[in-house]
Image (cartoon, rainbow, N blue to C red):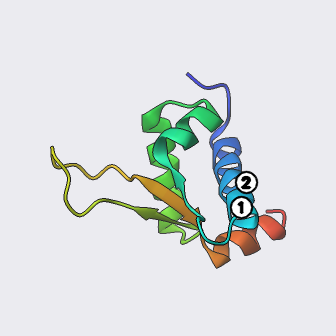
Amino acid sequence: MSDKTDAQVRSLILQVLYKKRRESTRDRSVNRETMIKSLEVEKDVLDYHMEYLAEKKLISISIPTISIPPNSDWVSAEITAQGIDHVDSGK
């Protein structure tokens, strides 16, 4: 179990995605496994926060249209312009 608060996890997610976008304009996404390792959180915890941030339109997540076995797990994510503004505003 992570000792990070929900707000800290969401902030860290945005920071990781923001950094990736600043470093690479061509490959702006971060895959799921990299996020799990970077943040040192459990998959369920990360997935919860990723869905929340996507609903707020701060990030976009990619879900494969065809997968075997079928699932709705996201495979990569990137920060949106709205997410960048959110990070820049220091919220």
Q: Position of residue 13 (x, y in %)?
A: 64, 50
Horizontal relation, residue 72 to residue 28: left or right: left
The crowding category of the residue bearing disc 2, from other C-alpha atoms within 10 Å (few below 14, some 14 to 19, many at least 20), is: some
User: Which residue is painted at 68% across and 32% down in the image?
Assistant: 4
Q: In the rendered image, which quarter contains the N terminus? A: top right
User: Which residue is painted at 50% across and 50% down in the image?
Assistant: 31
The residue lying toward the viewer, choosing from 1 and 40, is 40
Q: Is residue 37 above or below residue 55?
A: above
User: Which residue is painted at 27% across and 53% down in the image?
Assistant: 72
The three-letter amino acid code for the residue at tag 1 is Tyr
Q: Is residue 47 above or below residue 44?
A: below
Which residue does the numbered mark 1 point to in the structure image? 18
Which residue does the numbered mark 2 point to in the structure image? 15
Tell whether label 2 touches label 1 (CB within 8 Å): yes
The residue lying toward the viewer, choosing from 1 and 33, is 33
Q: Position of residue 68 (x, y in %)?
A: 16, 46
Q: Is residue 69 above or below residue 18?
A: above
Label 1 to label 2: alpha-carbon separation: 5 Å
